Image (tube, rainbow, N blue to C red):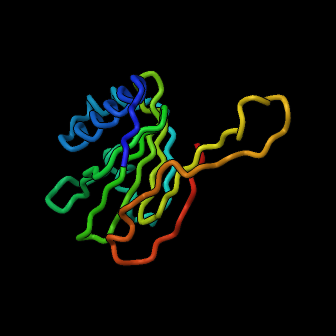
Amino acid sequence: MWARILTLEETTNKGVVLALYEALSSHDVVQVQKLLAPDLEWWFHGPPSHQFLMQILTGTAKFDNASFQFLPKTIDVFGSVVLVEGCDPTRSITWVHAWTVTDGVITQVREYFNTSLTVTRFRKKTQSDISSITPLHCPSVWESSLPNRVGKSVPGLVLAL
């Protein structure tokens, strides 16, 4: 299997998101604030009891040995969107974060818990005839791989880029 070569923008965006996970792990509030837009747009899909990221970002999380830790297993980038997937098998939890990075700052996060996610990209089938109405081609560019590790059926969603 071949690996797609990242653009400079994609490499930078991936670095911003990795820096956020490092700051979250070390409880570096100042660094987290530097990386996130003050008006961060946040979407959540999953059980309300799994809103761990919101608790961390709003300062309501309890940090102890039992607190939830976001440990990325895979990271993929598509332009301004950085997809990060992880799991906590002891709690039967899988998660996917779809971060949007704009000018080096995270402006949006879509968070999915115990959800199988397929990412697709909308585009015209041909670039030669932009003026006419043509069918859209929606290839799957990414699929979550961890939901099968929690040993239960999970809902599936499609995220269109």
Q: Residue at x 47, y 51 (%)?
A: 142
Residue 111 or residue 8, whichever sits in front: 8
Residue extending farthest to the bottom is 152
Residue extending farthest to the right is 132
| Relative side of 113 to 121, left or right | left
Residue 61 or residue 127, whichever sits in front: 127
Residue 135 or residue 63, whichever sits in front: 135
| Relative side of 107 to 23, left or right | right
| Relative side of 89 to 75, left or right | left
Q: Residue at x 39, y 78 (%)?
A: 152
Q: Position of residue 23 (x, y in %)?
A: 24, 37
Image quadrant assignment for residue 75:
top left
Q: Residue at x 42, y 58 (%)?
A: 144
| Relative side of 41 to 6, left or right | right
Q: Position of residue 154 (x, y in %)?
A: 46, 72
Q: Position of residue 110 (x, y in %)?
A: 48, 48
Location of the C terminus by quadrant is top right
Q: Position of residue 79 (x, y in %)?
A: 49, 32
Residue extending farthest to the left is 65
